[in-house]
């Protein structure tokens, strides 16, 4: 078994999941804590240097450079709620970074395309993500990153299973 730091051992020594847990001993606390730190870092860096937020960067990164992307696919791919996505797309359109095209046959279908300025901004966002990930890979040994990716994938799988169960239970309770 791998050697753990004293702090890690303390977290692992919980005798029962039912015992009262402090937030520092929960998995979700550490995921959220790290995510907020990353978000603050990206927002500080991107807003100061490029006049954009992390959310804007992620939207730009999820628009296909050549073929555009259906608006309905962008939000789910980055975990953004429809209202937030609508506001973000409106702001990007006002800045001239994207354009929206409505399908001639089905007016409900809207595709989002990057303008030349949007492509330039997308590249800046891409460089920021690459820079951050390079720094992490330089500082954290590969074997630890492999374990991290395995664990986070497993957490995502378990969360998806739980969400599926909850949706099924809600569906059944609504239709019985």
Image: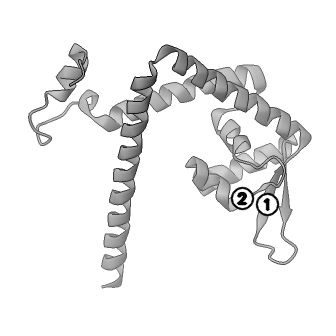
Residue extending farthest bottom: 176
Instruction: Quarter of the image for the N terminus: give it.
Output: top left
Residue that badge 1 annotates: 111
Which SS class for mark 1? strand
Q: Is residue 139 above or below residue 16?
A: above
Label 1: few (<14), some or many (≥20) within 10 Å?
some
Residue contact between numbered discs 1 and 2, judged by CB atoms under 8 Å = yes
How far from the left and from the top, in percent, is residue 20?
A: 14, 36
How far from the left and from the top, in percent, is residue 99?
A: 86, 52
Snapshot quadrant of residue 171: bottom left
How far from the left and from the top, in percent, is residue 126?
A: 71, 32
Left or right: residue 23 versus residue 125 is left
Say which residue appears at 65% left-offset and 21% top-offset.
131
The total of numbered circles placed on residues is 2
Residue that badge 2 annotates: 71
Q: Is residue 127 above or below residue 86?
A: above
Left or right: residue 59 versus residue 30 is right
How far from the left and from the top, in percent, is residue 166?
A: 33, 64
Label 2: few (<14), some or many (≥20) within 10 Å?
many
């Amino acid at each position: 078994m791998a050697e753990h730091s004293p702090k890690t051992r303390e977290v692992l020594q919980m005798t029962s999941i039912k015992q009262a847990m402090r937030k520092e001993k929960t998995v979700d606390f550490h995921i959220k804590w790290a995510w907020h730190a990353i978000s603050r870092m990206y927002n500080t860096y991107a807003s100061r240097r490029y006049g954009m937020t992390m959310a804007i960067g992620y939207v730009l990164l999820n628009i296909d450079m050549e073929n555009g992307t259906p608006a309905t696919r962008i939000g789910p791919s980055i975990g953004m709620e429809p209202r937030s996505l609508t506001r973000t797309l409106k702001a990007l359109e006002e800045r001239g970074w994207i354009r929206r095209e409505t399908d001639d046959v089905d007016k409900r279908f809207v595709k989002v395309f990057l303008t030349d300025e949007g492509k330039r901004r997308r590249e800046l966002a891409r460089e920021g993500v690459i820079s951050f990930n390079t720094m992490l890979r330089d500082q954290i040994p590969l074997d630890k990153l492999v374990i991290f990716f395995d664990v986070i994938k497993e957490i995502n799988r378990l969360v998806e299973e739980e969400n599926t169960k909850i949706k099924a239970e809600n569906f059944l309770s609504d239709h019985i």
